[in-house]
Image (spheres, helix red, strand yellow):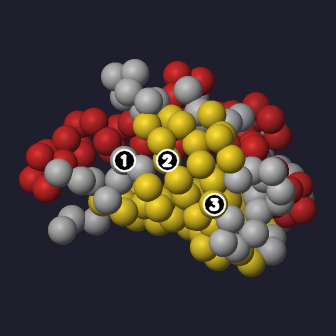
Amino acid sequence: MKIYTLHSKQNLPISLDEAWKFLSNPRNLKTITPDYMGFEILSGADRPMYQGQLIQYIVTPVLGIKTKWVTEITHVADKKFFVDEQRFGPYSLWHHKHFLKEIDGGVEMEDIVDYKIPMGILGQMVQPILVQPKLNEIFEYRRKKLIELFGEFK
C-alpha cells in the first residue's frame, strides 16, 4: 500500500481572520477550483464549518467523468487548522490538513494531503503521469486564484 503526500505552502497579505473566514467556508471551494472540474456542491455547505460536517459534491477530474465525492470535516481548531477526509470518492484514502499561521505582513497557509490511489499496481503506475500532475495543477490554480483575490505577498 503506497501513500503519497502533496505539500503546499502559500503566504497571503491578509489577516488571519480574513483567511480563516474565506478558507473555512465550504462554499468558497468552487471559487478556488478550476472551472473544467465542474465542481458542484450538492449538500452540506449551508453553514459554517464544524467538526462532523459532511459535504457532498460532484467533480469531473478527468475525461469528463462526473464523480460524486463526500468529505467529512474531522477536526477544526478555530483560526489554526481543519482536516477534511474523503468518505466516498475517487481515492482509497484522502486526508487533507489545512494549517493557518499568522506571520509578519499576513498569513501562511499550509496544506498537507496524504492520499492513496485505488487499483493496486495499476493505480501506482498512473499516479506519477496522471494523478500527481493533476493535483499539482489544481493546487497551482488555487495559488494563482488566491493571489488574484487577495494580492501577492511581498
Percent position of residue 144, x then y: 64, 34
Q: What is the spatial separation of the Cα atoms under label 2 and label 3, in whole angstroms?
A: 10 Å
Assign a secondary structure to mark 2.
Answer: strand
Q: Is disc 2 surrounded by few (<14), some (14 to 19) or many (20+) residues within 10 Å?
A: some
Whether residue 26 is visible, yes or no, is: no
Q: Nearer the viewer, residue 50 or 146?
A: 50
* Callout 1–callout 2 Cβ contact below 8 Å: yes
Disc 1 designates what residue?
A: 90
- Which residue type does callout 3 highlight? Leu
Q: What is the spatial separation of the Cα atoms under label 3 and label 1, in whole angstroms?
A: 16 Å
Give the quadrant of residue 54: bottom right
Disc 3 designates what residue?
A: 54
Earlier in the chain: of badge 1 and badge 2, it is 2
Percent position of residue 70, x then y: 53, 53
Disc 2 designates what residue?
A: 69
Q: Nearer the viewer, residue 20 or 46?
A: 46
* Callout 3–callout 1 Cβ contact below 8 Å: no
Percent position of residue 3, x then y: 28, 65
